[in-house]
Amino acid sequence: MVVTARELPALLPLLVVALTALAGAAMAAVRRSHTAAALVAGAGLTAALACIPAALRQAPQQLTPLLVIDPFGLFWTGLIIAATLIVVVLAHGCFARRPDPPVLVYTLLPAAATGAIAIVCSSHFASLLLGVAVSSVASYGLMAGVTTRPGARDASVKYLVLAAASTAVLVLGMALIYARLGTMEFGRMMALFTSRADFYDPMLLAGLALLVAGLGFHAAFVPFHPWMPDVYEAAPAPVAAFIETVSKSAVLALLIRDFRQSPTEGGSVYLLFTIVAVASLVLGNLLALRQASLERLLGYASIAHTGALLVAFQAGGRAGAEAATFYLTASAVAMLGAFGSVTVLSSGDGPTRLEDCRGWLRRRPLAGGVMTVMLLSLAGIPLTVGFRGIWLVAGAARSAGILPLLMVLVAASVVGLVAYLRVILVMGRRGPATPAGAAGAPAAGGLALGLLTALILGLGVWPVPLVDAIHAIFNGFV
Amino acid sequence: MTAIPLADGLLLAATLFVIGMAALMARRSAPFLVIAAVVMLNASGLAFVVAGARWGQADGQVMALFVLLAAAAAALAGSALARRRDSAEERPPAPPPARGRWRFLRDTGAGQVWQYATALAAGAVFFVVLVLWW
Protein backbone atom coordinates (compact mmCIF):
# COMPACT_ATOMS: atom_id res chain seq x y z
CA MET A 1 0.00 0.00 0.00
CA VAL A 2 3.03 2.25 0.26
CA VAL A 3 4.36 4.01 -2.81
CA THR A 4 7.98 2.96 -3.27
CA ALA A 5 10.71 5.05 -4.83
CA ARG A 6 10.62 2.83 -7.89
CA GLU A 7 6.99 3.73 -8.51
CA LEU A 8 7.48 7.39 -7.88
CA PRO A 9 7.94 8.50 -11.53
CA ALA A 10 4.36 7.43 -12.28
CA LEU A 11 3.14 9.85 -9.64
CA LEU A 12 5.51 12.68 -10.55
CA PRO A 13 3.19 14.77 -12.80
CA LEU A 14 0.54 14.95 -10.06
CA LEU A 15 3.14 15.70 -7.39
CA VAL A 16 4.86 18.42 -9.38
CA VAL A 17 1.56 20.19 -10.12
CA ALA A 18 0.64 20.05 -6.43
CA LEU A 19 4.09 21.38 -5.47
CA THR A 20 3.66 24.20 -7.99
CA ALA A 21 0.51 25.27 -6.17
CA LEU A 22 2.34 25.19 -2.83
CA ALA A 23 5.31 27.09 -4.23
CA GLY A 24 2.94 29.75 -5.54
CA ALA A 25 1.34 30.09 -2.12
CA ALA A 26 4.73 30.32 -0.40
CA MET A 27 5.92 32.92 -2.87
CA ALA A 28 2.83 35.05 -2.46
CA ALA A 29 3.68 35.26 1.25
CA VAL A 30 7.18 36.56 0.52
CA ARG A 31 6.87 38.71 -2.54
CA ARG A 32 3.65 39.71 -4.27
CA SER A 33 4.88 40.10 -7.80
CA HIS A 34 2.42 39.31 -10.54
CA THR A 35 4.95 38.37 -13.21
CA ALA A 36 7.13 36.33 -10.83
CA ALA A 37 4.10 34.35 -9.65
CA ALA A 38 3.09 33.61 -13.23
CA LEU A 39 6.66 32.56 -14.04
CA VAL A 40 6.79 30.15 -11.09
CA ALA A 41 3.46 28.60 -12.08
CA GLY A 42 4.57 28.36 -15.70
CA ALA A 43 7.90 26.76 -14.79
CA GLY A 44 6.25 24.26 -12.45
CA LEU A 45 3.65 23.25 -15.01
CA THR A 46 6.30 22.88 -17.72
CA ALA A 47 8.31 20.65 -15.39
CA ALA A 48 5.19 18.56 -14.73
CA LEU A 49 4.63 18.24 -18.45
CA ALA A 50 8.23 17.08 -18.86
CA CYS A 51 7.62 14.33 -16.26
CA ILE A 52 4.91 12.67 -18.32
CA PRO A 53 7.19 10.56 -20.58
CA ALA A 54 8.86 9.09 -17.49
CA ALA A 55 5.43 8.30 -16.04
CA LEU A 56 4.31 6.78 -19.33
CA ARG A 57 7.20 4.31 -19.19
CA GLN A 58 5.78 2.93 -15.94
CA ALA A 59 2.16 2.83 -17.04
CA PRO A 60 -0.16 1.11 -16.51
CA GLN A 61 0.21 0.93 -12.79
CA GLN A 62 -2.06 0.79 -9.78
CA LEU A 63 -0.70 3.05 -7.06
CA THR A 64 -2.45 2.11 -3.81
CA PRO A 65 -6.16 1.38 -4.24
CA LEU A 66 -6.70 5.10 -4.83
CA LEU A 67 -5.01 5.97 -8.11
CA VAL A 68 -4.49 4.20 -11.39
CA ILE A 69 -1.82 5.63 -13.67
CA ASP A 70 -2.49 4.31 -17.17
CA PRO A 71 -2.00 5.77 -20.67
CA PHE A 72 -5.57 7.13 -20.71
CA GLY A 73 -5.05 8.91 -17.41
CA LEU A 74 -1.68 10.26 -18.51
CA PHE A 75 -3.12 11.50 -21.82
CA TRP A 76 -5.65 13.56 -19.89
CA THR A 77 -3.07 14.56 -17.29
CA GLY A 78 -0.94 15.95 -20.12
CA LEU A 79 -3.89 17.79 -21.65
CA ILE A 80 -4.92 19.22 -18.27
CA ILE A 81 -1.40 20.47 -17.54
CA ALA A 82 -0.98 21.93 -21.02
CA ALA A 83 -4.36 23.67 -20.81
CA THR A 84 -3.50 25.07 -17.38
CA LEU A 85 -0.20 26.34 -18.74
CA ILE A 86 -1.99 28.15 -21.57
CA VAL A 87 -4.52 29.57 -19.11
CA VAL A 88 -1.63 30.86 -16.97
CA VAL A 89 -0.19 32.62 -20.01
CA LEU A 90 -3.57 34.10 -20.95
CA ALA A 91 -4.32 35.11 -17.37
CA HIS A 92 -1.02 36.94 -17.10
CA GLY A 93 -1.82 38.92 -20.22
CA CYS A 94 -5.35 39.63 -19.02
CA PHE A 95 -4.66 40.61 -15.41
CA ALA A 96 -1.49 42.58 -16.11
CA ARG A 97 -3.75 45.42 -17.32
CA ARG A 98 -5.28 45.76 -13.87
CA PRO A 99 -3.82 48.20 -11.36
CA ASP A 100 -3.80 45.53 -8.66
CA PRO A 101 -3.35 42.18 -10.42
CA PRO A 102 -4.43 39.12 -8.40
CA VAL A 103 -1.41 36.96 -7.54
CA LEU A 104 -3.60 34.27 -6.02
CA VAL A 105 -4.65 33.02 -9.45
CA TYR A 106 -1.30 31.34 -10.05
CA THR A 107 -1.73 29.28 -6.89
CA LEU A 108 -5.34 28.39 -7.49
CA LEU A 109 -4.89 27.31 -11.11
CA PRO A 110 -2.33 24.55 -10.32
CA ALA A 111 -4.37 23.59 -7.24
CA ALA A 112 -7.51 23.10 -9.31
CA ALA A 113 -5.46 21.23 -11.92
CA THR A 114 -4.24 18.88 -9.17
CA GLY A 115 -7.86 18.08 -8.33
CA ALA A 116 -8.69 17.51 -11.98
CA ILE A 117 -5.75 15.11 -12.42
CA ALA A 118 -6.88 13.23 -9.30
CA ILE A 119 -10.37 12.91 -10.82
CA VAL A 120 -9.01 11.54 -14.09
CA CYS A 121 -6.69 9.03 -12.38
CA SER A 122 -9.03 7.99 -9.57
CA SER A 123 -9.95 4.35 -9.08
CA HIS A 124 -11.64 4.75 -5.71
CA PHE A 125 -14.46 6.88 -4.31
CA ALA A 126 -12.08 8.57 -1.86
CA SER A 127 -9.74 9.90 -4.55
CA LEU A 128 -12.70 10.90 -6.72
CA LEU A 129 -14.24 12.85 -3.83
CA LEU A 130 -10.93 14.49 -2.96
CA GLY A 131 -10.35 15.44 -6.59
CA VAL A 132 -13.82 16.93 -6.98
CA ALA A 133 -13.51 18.80 -3.69
CA VAL A 134 -10.05 20.19 -4.38
CA SER A 135 -10.86 21.31 -7.90
CA SER A 136 -14.19 22.88 -6.97
CA VAL A 137 -12.87 24.66 -3.88
CA ALA A 138 -10.02 26.12 -5.95
CA SER A 139 -12.59 27.13 -8.57
CA TYR A 140 -14.64 29.00 -5.92
CA GLY A 141 -11.50 30.95 -5.21
CA LEU A 142 -10.89 31.62 -8.88
CA MET A 143 -14.46 32.81 -9.32
CA ALA A 144 -14.72 34.87 -6.17
CA GLY A 145 -11.19 36.21 -5.87
CA VAL A 146 -10.54 37.73 -9.25
CA THR A 147 -13.86 38.80 -10.70
CA THR A 148 -14.61 42.48 -10.82
CA ARG A 149 -17.41 42.42 -13.35
CA PRO A 150 -20.97 43.44 -12.55
CA GLY A 151 -22.86 40.54 -11.04
CA ALA A 152 -19.66 38.70 -10.21
CA ARG A 153 -20.65 38.19 -6.58
CA ASP A 154 -24.02 36.74 -7.51
CA ALA A 155 -22.40 34.37 -9.98
CA SER A 156 -19.78 33.36 -7.42
CA VAL A 157 -22.38 32.59 -4.75
CA LYS A 158 -24.40 30.68 -7.31
CA TYR A 159 -21.40 28.62 -8.36
CA LEU A 160 -20.25 27.94 -4.82
CA VAL A 161 -23.63 26.94 -3.40
CA LEU A 162 -24.59 24.78 -6.36
CA ALA A 163 -21.17 23.12 -6.58
CA ALA A 164 -21.34 22.28 -2.87
CA ALA A 165 -24.90 20.99 -3.22
CA SER A 166 -24.00 18.84 -6.20
CA THR A 167 -20.99 17.47 -4.34
CA ALA A 168 -23.46 16.49 -1.62
CA VAL A 169 -25.59 14.70 -4.22
CA LEU A 170 -22.49 12.93 -5.51
CA VAL A 171 -21.47 11.84 -2.00
CA LEU A 172 -24.96 10.58 -1.18
CA GLY A 173 -24.83 8.48 -4.34
CA MET A 174 -21.43 7.10 -3.35
CA ALA A 175 -22.71 6.30 0.15
CA LEU A 176 -25.71 4.38 -1.19
CA ILE A 177 -23.52 2.35 -3.55
CA TYR A 178 -21.06 1.66 -0.75
CA ALA A 179 -23.86 0.66 1.61
CA ARG A 180 -25.01 -1.92 -0.92
CA LEU A 181 -21.70 -3.24 -2.30
CA GLY A 182 -19.31 -2.82 0.59
CA THR A 183 -16.45 -1.61 -1.58
CA MET A 184 -15.37 1.77 -2.90
CA GLU A 185 -12.88 0.54 -5.50
CA PHE A 186 -14.11 0.92 -9.06
CA GLY A 187 -12.50 -2.34 -10.19
CA ARG A 188 -14.20 -4.44 -7.54
CA MET A 189 -17.48 -2.60 -8.07
CA MET A 190 -17.39 -3.42 -11.78
CA ALA A 191 -16.64 -7.05 -10.94
CA LEU A 192 -19.67 -7.16 -8.62
CA PHE A 193 -21.82 -5.51 -11.30
CA THR A 194 -20.80 -7.83 -14.10
CA SER A 195 -20.93 -10.97 -12.01
CA ARG A 196 -24.65 -10.45 -11.65
CA ALA A 197 -25.90 -9.24 -15.00
CA ASP A 198 -29.50 -8.94 -13.82
CA PHE A 199 -28.58 -6.66 -10.95
CA TYR A 200 -31.69 -4.91 -9.87
CA ASP A 201 -31.48 -3.29 -6.53
CA PRO A 202 -33.25 -0.04 -5.67
CA MET A 203 -30.53 1.29 -3.38
CA LEU A 204 -27.77 0.55 -5.87
CA LEU A 205 -29.62 2.05 -8.82
CA ALA A 206 -30.63 5.14 -6.84
CA GLY A 207 -27.01 5.55 -5.80
CA LEU A 208 -25.88 5.26 -9.40
CA ALA A 209 -28.45 7.86 -10.51
CA LEU A 210 -27.35 10.27 -7.78
CA LEU A 211 -23.69 9.70 -8.70
CA VAL A 212 -24.39 10.56 -12.32
CA ALA A 213 -26.41 13.60 -11.24
CA GLY A 214 -23.59 14.85 -9.02
CA LEU A 215 -21.02 14.43 -11.79
CA GLY A 216 -23.53 15.96 -14.22
CA PHE A 217 -23.22 19.32 -12.52
CA HIS A 218 -19.52 19.51 -13.27
CA ALA A 219 -19.96 18.07 -16.76
CA ALA A 220 -22.92 20.46 -17.25
CA PHE A 221 -25.34 18.25 -19.11
CA VAL A 222 -28.88 19.32 -19.32
CA PRO A 223 -30.84 19.30 -16.12
CA PHE A 224 -27.70 20.53 -14.32
CA HIS A 225 -26.44 23.06 -16.86
CA PRO A 226 -27.92 26.48 -16.04
CA TRP A 227 -24.99 27.68 -13.92
CA MET A 228 -22.56 27.42 -16.79
CA PRO A 229 -23.54 30.38 -19.01
CA ASP A 230 -23.98 32.62 -15.95
CA VAL A 231 -20.55 31.73 -14.61
CA TYR A 232 -18.87 32.16 -17.99
CA GLU A 233 -20.49 35.56 -18.36
CA ALA A 234 -19.34 36.80 -14.97
CA ALA A 235 -15.89 35.17 -14.79
CA PRO A 236 -12.84 36.66 -16.51
CA ALA A 237 -12.26 34.84 -19.81
CA PRO A 238 -9.16 32.90 -18.63
CA VAL A 239 -11.06 31.55 -15.62
CA ALA A 240 -13.97 30.53 -17.85
CA ALA A 241 -11.49 28.85 -20.20
CA PHE A 242 -10.06 26.93 -17.25
CA ILE A 243 -13.43 25.76 -15.91
CA GLU A 244 -14.45 24.73 -19.41
CA THR A 245 -11.35 22.85 -20.49
CA VAL A 246 -9.99 21.46 -17.23
CA SER A 247 -12.81 20.96 -14.72
CA LYS A 248 -15.41 19.86 -17.26
CA SER A 249 -13.09 17.67 -19.34
CA ALA A 250 -11.78 15.87 -16.27
CA VAL A 251 -15.25 14.74 -15.23
CA LEU A 252 -16.19 13.75 -18.78
CA ALA A 253 -12.93 11.78 -19.14
CA LEU A 254 -13.78 9.97 -15.91
CA LEU A 255 -17.20 9.08 -17.34
CA ILE A 256 -15.58 7.78 -20.54
CA ARG A 257 -13.19 5.64 -18.53
CA ASP A 258 -15.59 4.14 -16.03
CA PHE A 259 -18.86 3.78 -17.88
CA ARG A 260 -17.11 2.43 -20.99
CA GLN A 261 -17.40 -1.17 -19.86
CA SER A 262 -20.42 -1.08 -17.60
CA PRO A 263 -23.34 -3.20 -18.73
CA THR A 264 -25.60 -0.27 -19.51
CA GLU A 265 -26.74 -1.55 -22.89
CA GLY A 266 -30.53 -1.34 -22.99
CA GLY A 267 -30.71 -0.72 -19.27
CA SER A 268 -32.19 2.22 -17.46
CA VAL A 269 -28.87 4.04 -17.21
CA TYR A 270 -28.64 3.79 -21.00
CA LEU A 271 -32.07 5.38 -21.36
CA LEU A 272 -31.04 8.07 -18.89
CA PHE A 273 -27.98 9.04 -20.92
CA THR A 274 -30.00 9.00 -24.16
CA ILE A 275 -32.48 11.50 -22.74
CA VAL A 276 -29.67 13.65 -21.36
CA ALA A 277 -27.77 13.59 -24.67
CA VAL A 278 -30.81 14.63 -26.72
CA ALA A 279 -31.81 17.32 -24.25
CA SER A 280 -28.27 18.75 -24.09
CA LEU A 281 -27.91 18.80 -27.87
CA VAL A 282 -31.29 20.40 -28.54
CA LEU A 283 -31.34 22.91 -25.68
CA GLY A 284 -27.67 23.83 -25.96
CA ASN A 285 -27.79 24.61 -29.65
CA LEU A 286 -31.20 26.31 -29.63
CA LEU A 287 -30.23 28.58 -26.75
CA ALA A 288 -26.80 29.28 -28.27
CA LEU A 289 -28.74 30.71 -31.19
CA ARG A 290 -30.53 33.21 -28.98
CA GLN A 291 -27.70 34.62 -26.88
CA ALA A 292 -26.77 38.28 -26.96
CA SER A 293 -23.44 37.80 -25.21
CA LEU A 294 -20.46 35.92 -26.58
CA GLU A 295 -19.58 34.22 -23.29
CA ARG A 296 -23.10 32.92 -22.78
CA LEU A 297 -23.07 31.64 -26.34
CA LEU A 298 -19.86 29.74 -25.66
CA GLY A 299 -21.42 28.36 -22.47
CA TYR A 300 -24.37 26.95 -24.37
CA ALA A 301 -22.01 25.70 -27.10
CA SER A 302 -20.18 23.80 -24.38
CA ILE A 303 -23.45 22.22 -23.20
CA ALA A 304 -24.26 21.19 -26.76
CA HIS A 305 -20.80 19.67 -27.14
CA THR A 306 -21.33 17.60 -24.01
CA GLY A 307 -24.52 16.33 -25.62
CA ALA A 308 -22.64 15.32 -28.78
CA LEU A 309 -20.03 13.61 -26.65
CA LEU A 310 -22.76 11.61 -24.91
CA VAL A 311 -23.95 10.39 -28.33
CA ALA A 312 -20.52 8.83 -28.85
CA PHE A 313 -20.77 7.50 -25.33
CA GLN A 314 -24.11 5.87 -26.14
CA ALA A 315 -22.61 4.26 -29.22
CA GLY A 316 -20.56 2.33 -26.70
CA GLY A 317 -17.76 -0.11 -27.21
CA ARG A 318 -14.26 0.82 -28.10
CA ALA A 319 -15.14 2.84 -31.21
CA GLY A 320 -17.51 4.97 -29.16
CA ALA A 321 -14.99 5.58 -26.40
CA GLU A 322 -12.26 6.49 -28.89
CA ALA A 323 -14.60 8.85 -30.74
CA ALA A 324 -15.62 10.43 -27.43
CA THR A 325 -11.98 10.94 -26.42
CA PHE A 326 -11.12 12.52 -29.77
CA TYR A 327 -14.20 14.74 -29.68
CA LEU A 328 -13.56 15.90 -26.13
CA THR A 329 -9.94 16.73 -26.98
CA ALA A 330 -10.98 18.64 -30.10
CA SER A 331 -13.65 20.67 -28.35
CA ALA A 332 -11.37 21.42 -25.39
CA VAL A 333 -8.70 22.85 -27.74
CA ALA A 334 -11.28 24.91 -29.63
CA MET A 335 -12.92 26.22 -26.44
CA LEU A 336 -9.54 27.16 -24.99
CA GLY A 337 -8.72 29.04 -28.18
CA ALA A 338 -12.11 30.73 -28.28
CA PHE A 339 -11.91 32.00 -24.70
CA GLY A 340 -8.27 32.87 -25.31
CA SER A 341 -9.12 35.12 -28.21
CA VAL A 342 -11.95 36.66 -26.18
CA THR A 343 -9.29 37.49 -23.57
CA VAL A 344 -7.18 39.21 -26.19
CA LEU A 345 -10.01 40.89 -28.09
CA SER A 346 -12.49 42.14 -25.51
CA SER A 347 -11.94 45.08 -23.22
CA GLY A 348 -12.38 42.80 -20.24
CA ASP A 349 -14.55 44.84 -17.91
CA GLY A 350 -17.84 43.24 -18.75
CA PRO A 351 -19.46 40.48 -20.68
CA THR A 352 -18.83 40.78 -24.40
CA ARG A 353 -22.08 41.63 -26.14
CA LEU A 354 -22.40 40.49 -29.71
CA GLU A 355 -22.44 44.13 -30.90
CA ASP A 356 -19.04 44.55 -29.28
CA CYS A 357 -17.65 41.98 -31.71
CA ARG A 358 -18.37 44.25 -34.68
CA GLY A 359 -15.23 44.98 -36.65
CA TRP A 360 -12.99 42.54 -34.84
CA LEU A 361 -11.99 40.88 -38.09
CA ARG A 362 -11.05 44.20 -39.70
CA ARG A 363 -9.43 45.86 -36.72
CA ARG A 364 -7.55 42.85 -35.33
CA PRO A 365 -7.19 40.47 -38.28
CA LEU A 366 -4.90 38.04 -36.46
CA ALA A 367 -6.82 37.60 -33.23
CA GLY A 368 -10.12 37.82 -35.10
CA GLY A 369 -8.87 35.14 -37.46
CA VAL A 370 -8.03 32.87 -34.53
CA MET A 371 -11.52 33.39 -33.13
CA THR A 372 -13.00 32.55 -36.54
CA VAL A 373 -11.00 29.33 -36.79
CA MET A 374 -12.07 28.32 -33.29
CA LEU A 375 -15.75 29.01 -34.02
CA LEU A 376 -15.52 27.07 -37.30
CA SER A 377 -14.01 24.15 -35.41
CA LEU A 378 -16.77 24.31 -32.79
CA ALA A 379 -19.29 24.28 -35.63
CA GLY A 380 -17.60 21.25 -37.21
CA ILE A 381 -16.60 22.76 -40.57
CA PRO A 382 -14.27 20.57 -42.69
CA LEU A 383 -10.52 21.16 -42.44
CA THR A 384 -10.81 21.80 -38.72
CA VAL A 385 -10.35 19.23 -35.99
CA GLY A 386 -13.96 19.76 -34.88
CA PHE A 387 -15.14 18.27 -38.16
CA ARG A 388 -13.02 15.17 -37.63
CA GLY A 389 -14.43 14.84 -34.13
CA ILE A 390 -18.05 15.02 -35.19
CA TRP A 391 -17.26 12.69 -38.11
CA LEU A 392 -15.88 10.06 -35.73
CA VAL A 393 -18.86 10.45 -33.39
CA ALA A 394 -21.30 10.10 -36.26
CA GLY A 395 -19.40 7.05 -37.53
CA ALA A 396 -19.52 5.40 -34.11
CA ALA A 397 -23.24 6.16 -33.79
CA ARG A 398 -23.94 4.77 -37.26
CA SER A 399 -22.07 1.52 -36.71
CA ALA A 400 -23.80 1.10 -33.36
CA GLY A 401 -27.13 1.52 -35.15
CA ILE A 402 -28.49 4.36 -33.03
CA LEU A 403 -29.95 6.27 -35.97
CA PRO A 404 -32.46 8.43 -34.04
CA LEU A 405 -29.65 9.85 -31.92
CA LEU A 406 -27.54 10.36 -35.04
CA MET A 407 -30.36 12.34 -36.66
CA VAL A 408 -30.75 14.53 -33.59
CA LEU A 409 -26.99 15.11 -33.63
CA VAL A 410 -27.02 16.20 -37.28
CA ALA A 411 -30.06 18.45 -36.90
CA ALA A 412 -28.66 20.07 -33.75
CA SER A 413 -25.29 20.61 -35.45
CA VAL A 414 -27.00 22.56 -38.22
CA VAL A 415 -28.67 24.82 -35.66
CA GLY A 416 -25.32 25.24 -33.91
CA LEU A 417 -23.68 26.11 -37.20
CA VAL A 418 -26.07 29.04 -37.61
CA ALA A 419 -25.25 30.25 -34.09
CA TYR A 420 -21.50 30.27 -34.70
CA LEU A 421 -21.73 31.70 -38.22
CA ARG A 422 -23.80 34.56 -36.82
CA VAL A 423 -20.88 35.57 -34.60
CA ILE A 424 -18.42 35.37 -37.51
CA LEU A 425 -20.70 37.56 -39.64
CA VAL A 426 -20.95 40.16 -36.87
CA MET A 427 -17.16 40.10 -36.49
CA GLY A 428 -16.75 40.75 -40.21
CA ARG A 429 -19.01 43.79 -40.20
CA ARG A 430 -17.63 47.30 -40.23
CA GLY A 431 -17.08 48.31 -36.63
CA PRO A 432 -16.56 51.52 -34.68
CA ALA A 433 -13.59 53.53 -35.90
CA THR A 434 -11.87 53.86 -32.54
CA PRO A 435 -10.59 50.56 -31.24
CA ALA A 436 -12.44 49.98 -28.01
CA GLY A 437 -10.48 46.87 -27.12
CA ALA A 438 -7.13 46.50 -25.44
CA ALA A 439 -3.91 47.56 -27.11
CA GLY A 440 -2.23 44.47 -28.51
CA ALA A 441 -1.90 40.85 -27.59
CA PRO A 442 1.10 40.13 -25.37
CA ALA A 443 3.72 38.06 -27.19
CA ALA A 444 3.28 34.96 -25.01
CA GLY A 445 -0.51 35.03 -25.36
CA GLY A 446 -0.20 35.44 -29.11
CA LEU A 447 2.18 32.49 -29.24
CA ALA A 448 -0.25 30.30 -27.28
CA LEU A 449 -3.13 31.26 -29.55
CA GLY A 450 -1.00 30.58 -32.63
CA LEU A 451 -0.14 27.15 -31.28
CA LEU A 452 -3.82 26.34 -30.68
CA THR A 453 -4.74 27.50 -34.18
CA ALA A 454 -1.97 25.37 -35.68
CA LEU A 455 -3.30 22.39 -33.69
CA ILE A 456 -6.87 22.94 -34.89
CA LEU A 457 -5.92 23.29 -38.55
CA GLY A 458 -3.07 20.76 -38.53
CA LEU A 459 -5.11 18.01 -36.87
CA GLY A 460 -8.07 18.95 -39.04
CA VAL A 461 -6.10 18.30 -42.21
CA TRP A 462 -4.06 15.38 -40.89
CA PRO A 463 -5.72 13.86 -37.78
CA VAL A 464 -3.87 10.52 -38.00
CA PRO A 465 -1.35 11.21 -35.19
CA LEU A 466 -4.09 11.98 -32.65
CA VAL A 467 -6.29 9.10 -33.82
CA ASP A 468 -3.33 6.71 -33.57
CA ALA A 469 -2.39 8.01 -30.15
CA ILE A 470 -5.93 7.51 -28.86
CA HIS A 471 -6.01 4.06 -30.43
CA ALA A 472 -2.78 3.17 -28.64
CA ILE A 473 -4.23 4.46 -25.37
CA PHE A 474 -7.21 2.17 -25.63
CA ASN A 475 -4.91 -0.75 -26.45
CA GLY A 476 -3.69 -0.28 -22.90
CA PHE A 477 -7.14 -1.10 -21.55
CA VAL A 478 -8.29 -4.67 -21.25
CA MET B 1 -24.28 -1.28 22.49
CA THR B 2 -26.68 -2.26 19.75
CA ALA B 3 -26.01 -1.29 16.17
CA ILE B 4 -28.27 1.22 14.50
CA PRO B 5 -30.14 -0.46 11.63
CA LEU B 6 -28.96 0.61 8.18
CA ALA B 7 -32.40 1.70 7.04
CA ASP B 8 -32.92 3.99 10.04
CA GLY B 9 -29.55 5.66 9.63
CA LEU B 10 -30.04 6.20 5.91
CA LEU B 11 -33.53 7.55 6.54
CA LEU B 12 -32.12 10.13 8.94
CA ALA B 13 -29.43 11.09 6.43
CA ALA B 14 -31.99 11.38 3.64
CA THR B 15 -34.24 13.53 5.83
CA LEU B 16 -31.38 15.92 6.61
CA PHE B 17 -30.46 15.98 2.94
CA VAL B 18 -34.01 16.88 1.89
CA ILE B 19 -34.15 19.62 4.55
CA GLY B 20 -30.95 21.11 3.14
CA MET B 21 -32.25 20.89 -0.41
CA ALA B 22 -35.55 22.52 0.59
CA ALA B 23 -33.67 25.34 2.30
CA LEU B 24 -31.60 25.82 -0.84
CA MET B 25 -34.79 26.33 -2.82
CA ALA B 26 -36.64 28.42 -0.24
CA ARG B 27 -33.96 30.79 0.99
CA ARG B 28 -32.69 33.87 -0.83
CA SER B 29 -29.80 35.24 1.22
CA ALA B 30 -26.24 34.08 0.63
CA PRO B 31 -25.36 32.97 4.22
CA PHE B 32 -28.43 30.75 4.45
CA LEU B 33 -27.70 29.24 1.05
CA VAL B 34 -24.21 28.30 2.21
CA ILE B 35 -25.60 26.77 5.41
CA ALA B 36 -28.12 24.77 3.37
CA ALA B 37 -25.34 23.39 1.15
CA VAL B 38 -23.28 22.47 4.22
CA VAL B 39 -26.28 20.67 5.77
CA MET B 40 -26.61 18.65 2.56
CA LEU B 41 -22.92 17.78 2.55
CA ASN B 42 -22.98 16.65 6.16
CA ALA B 43 -26.12 14.59 5.59
CA SER B 44 -24.22 12.71 2.88
CA GLY B 45 -21.30 12.26 5.26
CA LEU B 46 -23.68 10.76 7.81
CA ALA B 47 -24.91 8.33 5.16
CA PHE B 48 -21.31 7.26 4.66
CA VAL B 49 -20.80 6.67 8.38
CA VAL B 50 -23.94 4.53 8.51
CA ALA B 51 -22.83 2.55 5.45
CA GLY B 52 -19.35 2.03 6.94
CA ALA B 53 -20.91 0.78 10.18
CA ARG B 54 -22.88 -1.78 8.22
CA TRP B 55 -19.72 -3.30 6.75
CA GLY B 56 -17.70 -2.90 9.92
CA GLN B 57 -15.09 -0.86 8.04
CA ALA B 58 -13.51 2.45 8.91
CA ASP B 59 -13.69 3.58 5.26
CA GLY B 60 -17.07 5.21 5.72
CA GLN B 61 -15.78 7.35 8.56
CA VAL B 62 -12.70 8.36 6.57
CA MET B 63 -14.98 9.48 3.76
CA ALA B 64 -17.10 11.39 6.27
CA LEU B 65 -13.96 13.23 7.38
CA PHE B 66 -13.20 14.17 3.77
CA VAL B 67 -16.77 15.40 3.39
CA LEU B 68 -16.36 17.48 6.54
CA LEU B 69 -13.25 19.05 5.00
CA ALA B 70 -15.14 19.87 1.81
CA ALA B 71 -18.01 21.33 3.83
CA ALA B 72 -15.62 23.44 5.91
CA ALA B 73 -13.93 24.81 2.79
CA ALA B 74 -17.29 25.61 1.22
CA ALA B 75 -18.47 27.34 4.39
CA LEU B 76 -15.26 29.36 4.62
CA ALA B 77 -15.33 30.51 1.01
CA GLY B 78 -19.06 31.13 1.26
CA SER B 79 -18.87 33.29 4.35
CA ALA B 80 -16.02 35.29 2.82
CA LEU B 81 -18.20 35.88 -0.24
CA ALA B 82 -21.32 36.63 1.75
CA ARG B 83 -19.52 39.45 3.56
CA ARG B 84 -18.59 41.11 0.30
CA ARG B 85 -21.23 43.47 -0.99
CA ASP B 86 -21.76 44.55 -4.54
CA SER B 87 -22.05 48.29 -4.63
CA ALA B 88 -25.18 49.58 -6.33
CA GLU B 89 -23.46 50.44 -9.58
CA GLU B 90 -21.81 47.03 -9.68
CA ARG B 91 -25.12 45.26 -9.60
CA PRO B 92 -26.23 44.22 -13.08
CA PRO B 93 -29.47 45.61 -14.45
CA ALA B 94 -32.30 43.12 -14.09
CA PRO B 95 -33.10 41.48 -17.41
CA PRO B 96 -36.61 42.02 -18.75
CA PRO B 97 -38.86 39.13 -17.76
CA ALA B 98 -39.49 36.73 -20.61
CA ARG B 99 -43.07 36.21 -21.69
CA GLY B 100 -44.89 33.82 -23.92
CA ARG B 101 -45.24 30.11 -24.20
CA TRP B 102 -41.65 29.39 -25.17
CA ARG B 103 -40.11 31.65 -22.54
CA PHE B 104 -38.01 28.82 -21.10
CA LEU B 105 -36.21 28.81 -24.42
CA ARG B 106 -35.64 32.56 -24.23
CA ASP B 107 -32.97 32.72 -21.51
CA THR B 108 -32.72 36.45 -21.11
CA GLY B 109 -30.00 36.30 -18.53
CA ALA B 110 -28.90 35.04 -15.17
CA GLY B 111 -31.43 33.22 -13.03
CA GLN B 112 -31.75 32.94 -9.27
CA VAL B 113 -30.12 30.32 -7.08
CA TRP B 114 -33.47 28.82 -6.12
CA GLN B 115 -34.34 28.24 -9.75
CA TYR B 116 -31.08 26.42 -10.35
CA ALA B 117 -31.41 24.49 -7.10
CA THR B 118 -34.89 23.43 -8.21
CA ALA B 119 -33.42 22.25 -11.51
CA LEU B 120 -30.75 20.33 -9.60
CA ALA B 121 -33.27 18.72 -7.26
CA ALA B 122 -35.77 17.98 -10.03
CA GLY B 123 -33.01 16.53 -12.18
CA ALA B 124 -31.72 14.29 -9.41
CA VAL B 125 -35.23 13.10 -8.52
CA PHE B 126 -35.98 12.54 -12.20
CA PHE B 127 -32.82 10.49 -12.60
CA VAL B 128 -33.60 8.32 -9.58
CA VAL B 129 -37.24 7.79 -10.52
CA LEU B 130 -36.39 6.97 -14.13
CA VAL B 131 -33.68 4.51 -13.19
CA LEU B 132 -35.84 2.77 -10.59
CA TRP B 133 -39.01 2.71 -12.60
CA TRP B 134 -37.66 1.43 -15.88
Image (spheres, grey):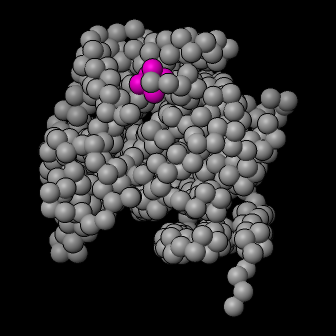
Residue A251 lies left or right of residue A465; in this view the side is: right
Answer yes or no: is residue A126 visible: yes
Answer yes or no: is residue B29 visible: no
For the N terminus of chain A, the image quarter is: bottom left
Residue A40 lies left or right of residue A320; in this view the side is: left
Q: Quadrant of residue B114?
A: bottom right
- Identify the residue at horizontal 72%, vertical 71% (top origin): B6
Q: Is residue A456 above or below residue A260?
A: above
- Identify the residue at horizontal 52%, vertical 45% (top origin): A191
Q: Is residue A94 above or below residue A443?
A: below
Residue A55 lies left or right of residue A340; in this view the side is: left
Residue reaching furthest to the front: A195
Residue B48 percent across, percent down from the top left = 60, 69
Residue A292 lies left or right of residue A136; in this view the side is: right
Which of A127/A44 is in front? A127
Residue A465 percent across, percent down from the top left = 24, 19
Q: Quadrant of residue A138?
A: bottom left
- Identify the residue at horizontal 29%, vertical 10% (top origin): A461
- Residue A320 within the magenta-colored segment of the rendering: yes
Magenta-drawn stretch, dominant element (helix, strand or loop):
helix
Residue A313 percent across, percent down from the top left = 53, 28
For the C terminus of chain A, the image quarter is: top left
Which of B37/B1 is in front? B1
- Residue B42 within the magenta-colored segment of the rendering: no
Numbered range of the magenta stretch: A319-323
- Identify the residue at horizontal 78%, vertical 33% (top origin): B103
Residue A380 percent across, percent down from the top left = 45, 15
Which of B44/A144 is in front? B44
